Image: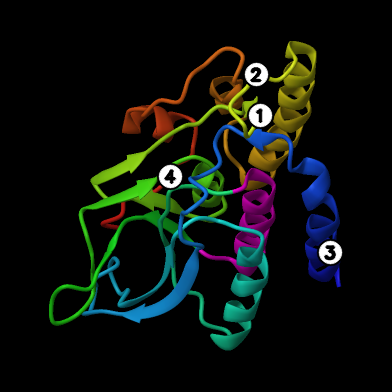
Amino acid sequence: MRLARFVAALLVLGPVLAPIAAAQSPAPDAAPMTFTLVTGAPDSCGPGCAQWIAAEGAVMPGSVVAFAEFVKQIGGARPPLVIHSPGGMLEVTLALGRIVRRTGLDTIVARTDRSGDAPVLALDGACFGACFYLLAAGRNRSAAPGAAIAISPVDFRHPAGGELPEAMRTRLIATTLEKVRAYLTEMGVDIDLALYLDGERYEPFYPARGLLETYGLINRDPAN
C-alpha cells in the first residue's frame, strides 16, 4: 500500500516538479534500470556466490515498482545487487534504496560481463549521480577494483539551461540535504559524508576509495 501511494504521488507531483531538475539526474535518453537474475560460475561474485541481481541503467519512477515485483519473483533468495548505473532521479533512488535495505541485500558496484561462456563481474563498473544512494542501501557494500564511483552534490537547475533564482536554489538544496542526511543515517553511513553533498560548496568528483571506506560507504572487500 505504501509503495502504491508513493508511485501515485510521483505521478501527481511530476508536472509540478517539471520546471526544476536536479543536477545529478541522468541524460534524458538514458535507459531505465533493469533487474536481471544472473547465474555465473562458482564464486564469480565472491566466495560461495554464483548468482546476483544485475541492476543496469538509470533509476526512473518505474524502477521502484519493477524492483518490488522482481523481489516477489525471486522469493526468499537474497543475492547481491550488482549496480552499473549512470544515476537517476534522487527521490526515486532514495525510495528504491529503502526497499533494497528492507529486502536485506548486499550491494556491489561492478559491470556484469556477459561476453564469455558464463557471466562474470568485470573489474570495472560505474556508479554516477544518484547511484551513490543505491550503493549505500546495501547491508554490506563493495565495489570492483576499477569501478568509478562519483559523488554528485545536491544541486538544481532549470531544465532549459537557465539559472534558478538563488534563494530558490538555496532552499531546494537545504531541504533535499535534510532528506539525504536522514537517509544516510538510516543506512548506517557516516553523516559527515553529507558535507560533500552540498551543491553550494562542492562540485561532482571521484573520491579515492579510502574516503569511501572512511565514511562507511564501502564497508567490505569484494573478494570476501
Q: Nearer the viewer, mark 3 or mark 4?
A: 3
In front of the other: 159 or 64: 159
Q: Residue type at mark 3? A: Ala
Q: Above or below — where is 135 with respect to 75?
A: above
Q: Residues within 10 Å of mark 4 (few under 14, many from 20)?
A: some
Q: Which residue is mark 4?
A: 219
Report how far apart the C-alphas of labels 3 and 1 lie in the structure.
24 Å
Report how far apart the C-alphas of labels 3 and 2 lie in the structure.
30 Å
- Residue 167, image quadrant: top right
Left or right of residue 195: residue 222: left
Report how far apart the C-alphas of labels 3 and 4 lie in the structure.
35 Å
**Main secondary structure of the magenta stretch:** helix
Q: Give how far across and how far down residue 125 sits, in percent.
A: 30, 51
Q: Which residue is mark 3?
A: 8
Asked if the residues shown at circle 2 and circle 4 are in contact, with their CB atoms under 8 angstroms apart, the answer is no
Q: Give how far across and how far down residue 66 sits, in percent.
A: 61, 73
Q: Give how far across and how far down residue 91 sits, in percent.
A: 69, 47
Q: Which residue is mark 2?
A: 163
Q: Residue type at mark 1? A: His
Q: Which residue is mark 1?
A: 158
Whichever of callouts 3 and 1 sits on the residue coming sooner in the sequence is 3
Which residues make up the magenta segment? Answer: 89-105
